[in-house]
């Protein structure tokens, strides 16, 4: 499967990249903007500030207790216990607060990236379906032709994509792996929504059922998507902070994602049943 996708990717690189870029570029830029805005609004830097403020309060409390020497041994012992209690309470409160503050930005960033990038991937995948299948049949095809097909099935594609992205996002928030498994299980849904009289939950369920015997290929293509995503992030981090980072990350994804997306379309071609009800192509 990978060899076939790589051959198609090499021979029709420009057509694949241009077709997928229509969906991937806006999705990547929206994801980067949403994450940056959300993290700024949440005040990620406030964790250290909160820790410092709480530490200062504890230290001030300790100084206040020490400035009045106890007149008796019993009072002195009581004062020591108060100092210890203040330190322990401060550490516990700071630790719990830090955990919540640290988890919230991570959860937000994960949700935004998963939802927006998956939406872009789903649309790009849908547009790649008519392009790849017609190229495999030896017919001329391009980005405009592919997106004309998407326009005829936009409602079905949108409903299926939104539902799939929502489920995968919830899975991604549960320690990432469930989200990746759900994404792999929906690998055929864009093609089903594009080529058949199915959408939404029905398309997602059909994708799950038809992957029997093809799970290795689906997981392999999604492993490539994850690897390319990591590569894009590393390329962006290598640059100094600024607007160049999201642009470079988007460029890497736009150039590399069409390879596994073409593989997923080929997987649909090989996994589909012999007789299915097709949607007629646009004139």
Image: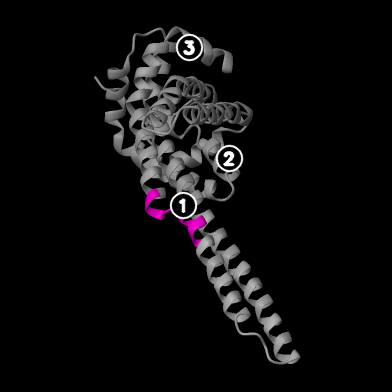
Give whichever of discs 1 and 3 has the lower sequence position.
3
Numbered label attached to residue 8: 3
Q: Earlier in the sequence, mark 1 or mark 2?
A: 1
**Residue under the image location 65 percent in, 85 percent down:** 69
Where does the image place residue 174, in percent across and percent down from the top left?
57, 51
Tell me where residue 25 sits by quadrant. top left
Q: Which residues are magenta?
A: 40-50
Residue 172, labelled with which disc?
none
Q: Quadrant of the C terminus?
A: top left
Q: Nearer the viewer, mark 1 or mark 2?
A: 1
Q: Position of residue 130 (x, y in %)?
A: 37, 21
Q: Is residue 257 above or below residue 116?
A: above
- Crowd around label 2: few <14 · some 14–19 · many ≥20 (10 Å): some
Residue linked to disc 2? 181
Q: Are marks 1 and 2 in contact (CB under 8 Å)?
A: no
Residues under labels 2 and 3: Cα distance? 26 Å
Q: Residue at x 73, y 85 (%)?
A: 77
Q: Which residue is mark 1?
A: 45
Instruction: State the residue lying farthest toward the right.
Output: 73
Which circle, 1 or 3, is nearer the viewer?
A: 1
Which residue of the protein is positioned furthest toward the left in this rendering? 283
């Amino acid at each position: 499967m990978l060899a076939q996708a790589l051959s198609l990717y090499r021979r029709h690189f420009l057509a694949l990249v241009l077709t997928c870029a229509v969906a991937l570029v806006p999705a990547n830029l929206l994801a980067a903007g949403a994450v940056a805005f959300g993290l700024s609004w949440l005040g990620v830097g406030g964790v250290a500030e909160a820790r410092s403020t709480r530490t200062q309060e504890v230290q001030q409390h300790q100084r206040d207790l020490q400035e009045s020497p106890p007149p008796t041994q019993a009072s002195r012992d009581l004062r020591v216990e108060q100092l210890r209690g203040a330190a322990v309470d401060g550490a516990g409160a700071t630790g719990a607060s830090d955990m919540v503050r640290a988890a919230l930005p991570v959860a937000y960033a994960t949700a935004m990236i998963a939802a927006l990038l998956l939406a872009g991937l789903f649309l790009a995948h849908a547009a790649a379906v008519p392009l790849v299948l017609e190229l495999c049949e030896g017919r001329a095809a391009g980005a405009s032709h592919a997106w004309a097909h998407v326009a005829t099935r936009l409602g079905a594609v949108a409903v299926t994509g939104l539902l799939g992205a929502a489920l995968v996002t919830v899975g991604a928030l549960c320690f990432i792996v469930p989200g990746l498994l759900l994404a792999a299980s929906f690998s055929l849904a864009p093609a089903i929504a594009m080529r058949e009289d199915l959408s939404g939950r029905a398309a997602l369920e059909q994708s799950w059922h038809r992957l029997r015997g093809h799970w290795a290929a689906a997981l392999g293509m999604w492993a490539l998507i994850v690897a390319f995503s990591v590569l894009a992030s590393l390329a962006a981090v290598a640059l100094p902070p600024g607007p160049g980072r999201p642009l470079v990350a988007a460029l890497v994804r736009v150039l590399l994602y069409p390879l596994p997306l073409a593989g997923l379309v080929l997987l649909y071609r090989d996994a589909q049943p012999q007789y299915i009800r097709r949607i007629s192509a646009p004139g």
